[in-house]
Image (tube, rainbow, N blue to C red):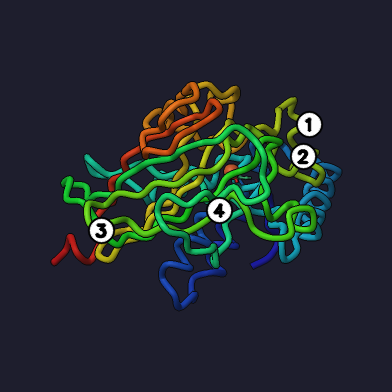
Amino acid sequence: MRDFDEHTITQAVVDRLADTPDPRLKAVLTSLVRHLHDFVRDVDLTFAEWQAGIAFLTRTGQTCDAHRQEFILLSDTLGVSMLVDAINHRMPEGATETTVLGPFYVQEAPERPNGADIAGPLEGTPLLVTGSVAAADGTPLGGASVDVWHADEDGAYDVQQLDRLGGLAGRARFRTDAEGRFHFWTIMPTWYPIPDDGPVGDMLKATARHPNRPTHVHFMIAAPGHETLITHVFSADSPWLDSDAVFGVKDSLVAAFAEHPPGTAPDGRRMERAYRYLAYDFGLKPAADTRAA
Ligand code: BEZ
Ligand code: FE
């Protein structure tokens, strides 16, 4: 076969995939080729635009290193991450909704006891977080692991300022008690821009978009027999809730980080200064193999 034109080339490429042994790879690649070709025809892509696209993707790869994943950021800002999330996390009643993991999760977070203050050297308005973890049917899950991490009052994560802080801060792993409860103190985070000094930032500027994410605390919650929950809780009084740069906000994940005057906090701690308080209860979806059994 030769002499392909703009109409016949697509089927020729699809035919060339006919012997792909892995059926899923064959299906995914075939669909990718069809959509990619349709896109090129749809916009009548010029040669200069094709070159610019290749240069953009090349720079995106070159911006990645051990600490920065510009391709995931590109996926996040084009809504692909949340689309994959939506397809893969259709949640039953009683299970908390999911959202993006983001680039600032650390696998080896320090294990801390319930009630610990995880702010370390971070300064800001004290924040008390209390919560519970249950199965979707409401059964409390004792012994669940609860990873939390959040930005500081300037919108920076610990891993973005390790030299200044001298270590991790504003992150920890807790275990729920027998009633599925956990609680800890930290400081109130604020909204922040995603890293926008690379190709993704250029794309946001070229499309007149801002890079900001609303104020949130990240949670990753794991318990045997359940799907690991990756989510955030957003502060109801934050700007950008309706224009999150990575499309991660869901109504069910927005909660009050209530302002409290000095006094006795809900965990019994005597507070000499004003503080904020977030209370949020999480539900976990049964693992796929548990539901099949
Ligand atoms: C975050 O919330 O940490 C985040 C998520 C997506 C992209 C950048 C940051
Ligand atoms: Fe974040």
Amino acid type of the residue tagged 3 in the rendering? Gly
Q: Residues within 10 Å of mark 2 (few under 14, many from 20)?
A: many
Q: Nearer the viewer, mark 2 or mark 4?
A: 4
The residue that mark 4 highlights is 171
Q: Which mark is residue 201?
A: 2
Figure quadrant of the N terminus: bottom right
Name which quarter of the figure residue 258 lies in: top left
Q: CA distance from mark 2 to mark 3?
A: 42 Å
Quarter, ligand 1: top right
Circle 4: is it few (<14), some (14-19), or many (20+) Cα within 10 Å? many
Mark 4 to mark 3 CA distance (whole Å): 21 Å
Residue beneath disc 1 = 205
Q: Are marks 2 and 1 in contact (CB under 8 Å)?
A: yes
| Quadrant showing the C terminus | bottom left
Residue that extends furthest to the left in the rendered view of this protein: 293
Of the residues shown, which amino acid type is indicated by label 1?
Lys
Residue 222 lies, in percent from the top left, at: 36, 60
Estimate the spatial distance between the alpha carbons at disc 2 and disc 4, rounded to whole Å.
27 Å
Q: Earlier in the sequence, mark 2 or mark 3?
A: 3
Q: Residue at x 30, y 46 (%)?
A: 132
Q: Mark 4 or mark 1, which has the lower sequence index?
A: 4
Q: Is mark 1 within 8 Å of ligand 1?
A: no
- 67 lies left or right of 227: right
Q: What whole-number distance in Å separates the C-alpha atoms at marks 3 and 1?
A: 46 Å
